[in-house]
Image: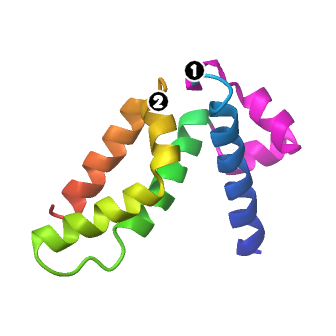
Amino acid sequence: MEYKKDKTDRLIQDTLIALMKEHDYNEITITDIVNKSYLSRSTFYAHYKKKDEILISYLDSMMGHVFEHLEGDSMDILIHIFAHINEEREDIRLILDSSASHLFRKELRKKLISEGI
């Protein structure tokens, strides 16, 4: 059952990112996300309460992958982090160029602090 939840979460996240390629983050509504993802509103709200939660969840997933298995000295860790960020550069650029850039900076700062970097 967890697989279905993860799949739906990913669909909602991917839909938000797709919509951000067409519109600024602040212009996107829950209705837009529901319509483009072909999900019911109740399914959407079973996963997320507001739009910011979608982006934060997406960033948590991305950063969780980036910060997995960090070992070595500070330089090795930074090289590892930047290599993963480079792989996700299109989505990161999209987010940083949007009105949601503050969410990316906030989540990155929180992750760096929690990892002691």
Question: Earlier along the polypeptide chain: callout 2 or callout 1?
Answer: 1
Residue shown at the point (15%, 63%) measured from the top left: 116
Residue shown at the point (52%, 45%) measured from the top left: 91
Q: Give the range drawn in magenta.
A: 25-49
Q: Looking at the picture, how far across and down is residue 36, in whole percent?
A: 83, 37
- Identify the element where label 2 is drawn: loop
The question of residue 62 being in magenta is answered with: no
Q: Looking at the picture, how far across and down is residue 53, in whole percent?
A: 55, 42
Q: The N terminus appears in which quarter of the rendering?
A: bottom right
Label 1 amino acid?
Asn
Colour style of the rendered protein structure? rainbow
- Identify the element where label 1 is drawn: helix
Of all residues shown, which one is farthest toward the top? 27
Q: Looking at the picture, how far across and down is residue 83, in whole percent?
A: 34, 64
Residue shown at the point (81%, 48%) measured from the top left: 43
Give the left or right position of residue 107, taking residue 9 as reference. left
Q: Mark 2 points at which residue?
A: 100
In the rendered image of this protein, does residue 79 appear above or below residue 31?
Answer: below
Looking at the image, do the residues carrying marks 2 and 1 touch, with CB atoms under 8 Å apart?
yes
Closer-to-camera residue (39/49)? 39
Q: Is the magenta stretch mostly helix, strand or loop?
A: helix
Number of other residues with Cα within 10 Å of mark 1, as a class: few under 14, some 14 to 19, many 20 or more: few
Label 2 amino acid?
Ala
